[in-house]
Amino acid sequence: MLMFLPLAATMAFGMSSVGVIYLYILGFDFMRFMVHSNLEIVPLRPFELFPFLRLLLITPSYHSLHHDSGVCNFCLFMPLYDYLGGTLNTTPFKTHERIRKEGREELVADSVFLPHAVDFVSALHMGMIGRTFASYPRRSTRWFTLPFLPLVMLGSIIGWFWIKPYVVLHYTLHGITQQTWGIPTYGFQYLIPSLHKYLNKFIEEAILEADRIGVKVITLGALNKNEAMNGGGLLFVEKHKNLKVRVCHGNTLTTAALLHELADDVKEVFLTGSTSKIGKAIALYLCRKHVKVLMLTASEERYQAVVKEASNDCKKYLVRATKYEAGQNTKTWIIGKWAGYHAQQRAPTGTHFHQFTLPPIIHYRRDCTYHDSVGIRLPDKFVQGVNSCEHTMPRYVVHACHAGGLIHALEGWQHHEVGPVDVDKLDVVWEAAMKHGFTLA
């Protein structure tokens, strides 16, 4: 009867409506279930800004003390009434504060992978619609995701002003605890140079948070390691020289895995994106194997910078190309820069397209073979807790840069893997991956 008094008052004054009645009942049920859930979902920040809210909003910690003692904190909604009645116990206020501050530290991951959403639909694939949807690889935009897109767009605007990494996936492998922390940013934002400063700030905060709670390795996924934006993570390492957490871009394993996708008897490749971190490492590694590399680049200066790093007996295998027509007789194409319909038409029939570009190129040619983003299969006999798929990858398959961070943690390496890819470490990282049971997907 006591809970009916507010509704009775609105009815008596002629201010009630069907909407008010439903809203009140739903609000009452939400509060009742929330305080009995033993899950602290109420953020700490509002109470820090407005301490008086402690007397206006109840939390599960507050009500749990009533069940433990039975002599205080009787109110189901507003602690103000307990204060007025002399039955208020403030101990739960400190309990709530401790839980909110230490909740993430109860289980500290050894390794963290830090990706971002590709587009609005990929954000829904991060467990926001349901576990079933996230447990299958993303192949296309499903019709039932469309009604959620306006909410995601609105959330992206709000999230821009309050971006915090959140746990998307948690699993263990060979005794290593691995987490994926999602950042609510989207691929198109990384293409706007004026936003790079803000994106770097969000990534930096995630790195410092990982360092604070004791994470050993944090791996930057997708465009979070954009060379033009932060030099493949080098910016953060140089700015914070006392980091205990190792920052890793994972490109070493990505490069090694792509090289092992190539046929053993390959003699010539056509390489786009040839002066990027991964492209340069591929070119230098292949020329050591006496494989001719046609390097597509518009910059003579950047081409010469790559050639300068090759030994004298290998330089002749690095050939500059300025047009896609240069690859018309080469059946192995390595795509490091987006190639559209007309570019792909220059490849001969039977070409194998290998790629490390983001996003992956569209499959325009039916007479060619496409190898999408480099994937690494986890050793499923030793992994526990993988309950979702990483974007377009099948279950138990992750992007190579993700696996690269895992290898870093499993091996206990103490160096930062940032900046240019070290060609001398390609075989070392690949052998370590094979040792721990990782395979090409």
Image (cartoon, grey):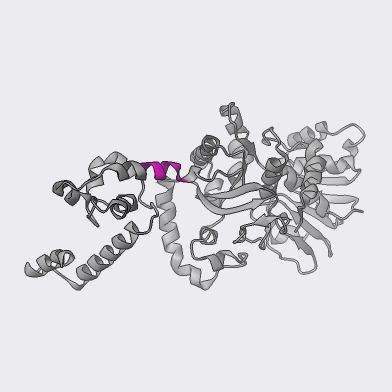
**In which quadrant is the C terminus drawn?**
bottom right
Q: Position of residue 195 (x, y in %)?
A: 50, 42
Q: Main secondary structure of the magenta part?
A: helix
**Would you say residue 297 is visible in this rendering?**
no
Q: Is residue 279 above or below residue 351?
A: above
**Residue 98 among those drawn in magenta:** yes
Residue at 70% x, 49% y is: 174
Q: Position of residue 217 (x, y in %)?
A: 63, 40
Q: Is residue 129 above or below residue 335?
A: below
Q: In this rendered view, identify the residue nearer to me: 285 or 104.
A: 104
Relative placement, left or right, of 15 versus 121 is left
Q: In this rendered view, identify the residue nearer to me: 39 or 112.
A: 39
**Would you say residue 364 is visible in this rendering?**
yes
Q: Position of residue 328 (x, y in %)?
A: 83, 57
Residue 247, quarter of the rendered image = top right
Relative placement, left or right, of 30 versus 341 is left
Relative placement, left or right, of 55 versus 135 is left
**In which quadrant is the N terminus drawn?**
bottom left
The range drawn in magenta is 97-103
Residue 384, quarter of the rendered image = bottom right
Relative placement, left or right, of 53 versus 423 is left
| Residue that protrudes farthest toward the left in the picture | 13
Q: Position of residue 332 (x, y in %)?
A: 83, 55
Residue at 58% x, 49% y is: 179
Report the number of numbered marks: 0
**Residue 197 among those drawn in magenta:** no
